[in-house]
Amino acid sequence: MRIAIVGTELCAVDRRGGGLEQVLRRWAQGLALRHEVIVVSHQPGARSVAADDEPYEVRTVDRPADLAGAVAALAPDVVSLHNRPSWVTWCSPGTATAVTFHNYPPAWKVPARFLARTRAAVRGAEMGAVSAALGAAAAAHLGVTAGRVWLTPPSIDPAYVSPPPWRPEDVVLSPNRLLRKKGVLELLEVAARHEFANVTFAFADLVSPWLRPTAEHRELRDAVRSTANAVLFAPASTPAELAERYARSAVVVCPVREEEGLGLVALEAQACGVPLVTTDLGGLSEATFPPNAAVPAGDPDALAGAISSALRRQAAPVPGPRRAVLRHHTPAASAAVFEAWLQAAVERRAGRPPATGDSPAGR
């Protein structure tokens, strides 16, 4: 197959990109072992992008409006779009188009006035989502049956597949972006409880994709600094560096306040063998494997209790969550499902029954 994987306009699809961009890179790497892969990356003003010795080709566009011409010139068998269902209208009707959802509808940048047009456009496209919960939400928002949306598990970086040994210190780690929706204030409320006085709560000073801190970031920095047992740490520059920080943490916490598509941090932490506590919003519950706990959002007592329980597990690591992550979220396992889905999309566009069968929601 000739496959065009299109990034969003938010970040270039390269080593500097965020979580979504890294998932795309790993899919492209896996697919390039057997197919011709071109990554279409947004980078205003760029004429070329170094592919970092990747096994796929990179084409750049200045803006989304340039996509139609760029994709048409590539003449792919299938176009893989991400979080941008409205861009289906810029793809040739004769080309198979597959849209993968990584986040809930507010992240898709589809204004209400364009929703009807987008719903009509995606009827001819394939749709996938990184969790069953997100798939159901995407189907409801776009007015299609849940069975139309495949489950396309994302991968984690190889640094978390082969992590350093777990040697926990008394640290509760929050490596997500420094945003209210990530539950920073709720976790600080728990940190201030007397039973955690001797535990350090560490927060990533992560403002990406913003280039400089916003008022929200500054407010949250002040809140962390004003909590006696809380600290900020510089974001990891590589996955290996973050894997090392996971390995020195007693618990990783993702106390989000808004629905997550799935939760790469949760998968990464469990692959490293670290106890995890999350809230049960969106696909994050699907990314949290027993005995790790997903507690109700907005319940500080439940959050504190789950963290206390997780801290007591320092002397007895449990292998089950790591095995569960590696079953579906290694680069190879994830790419295999994604490849089968794209192949099925091409077969259906050609009017042939997919060789892999047609069981979207349960795959």
Image: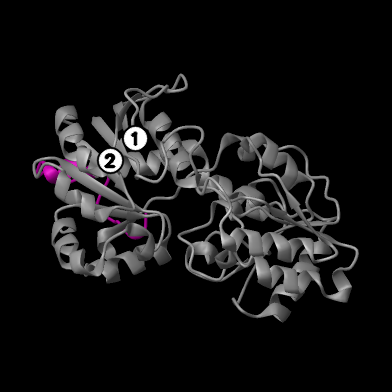
At horizontal 41% and vertical 39% (from top left) the residue drawn is 24
Residue 184 in picture, x, y percent from top left? 65, 65
**Few, some or many C-alpha atoms within 10 Å of disc 2 (few <14, some 14-19, many ≥20)?**
some
Q: Which residue is label 2 attached to?
A: 63
Q: Quadrant of residue 49?
A: top left
Q: Callout 1: few (<14), some (14-19), or many (20+) C-alpha neighbours within 10 Å?
A: few
Q: Residue furthest right?
A: 198
Res 122 → quadrant: bottom left
Q: Is residue 141 above or below residue 86?
A: below
Is residue 53 in the magenta section?
A: no
**Of residues 327 and 314, which is closer to you in this image?**
314
Answer yes or no: is residue 72 visible: yes
Q: Earlier in the sequence, mark 1 or mark 2?
A: 1
Kindly report the secondary structure that dominates the magenta region of the rendered protein.
loop
Magenta stretch?
A: 345-363
Judged from the image, the secondary structure of the residue bearing numbered disc 2 is loop
The residue identified by callout 1 is 44
Circles 1 and 2 in contact, beta carbons < 8 Å: yes
Q: Which is nearer the eye, 43 or 266?
A: 43
Circle 1: element type:
loop
Q: Is residue 60 positioned above or below 267 on the image?
A: above
Residue 240 position, x and y percent, is 66, 35
Q: Residue at x 72, y 66 (%)?
A: 223
On screen, residue 174 versus residue 65, left or right, reads: right
Residue 211 position in % (x across, y down): 53, 45
Mark 1 to mark 2 CA distance (whole Å)? 7 Å
Q: Which mark is residue 252?
A: none
- The amino acid type of the residue labelled 1 equals Pro
Residue 351 is one of the magenta-drawn residues: yes
Number of callouts:
2
Image quadrant holding the N terminus, namely top left
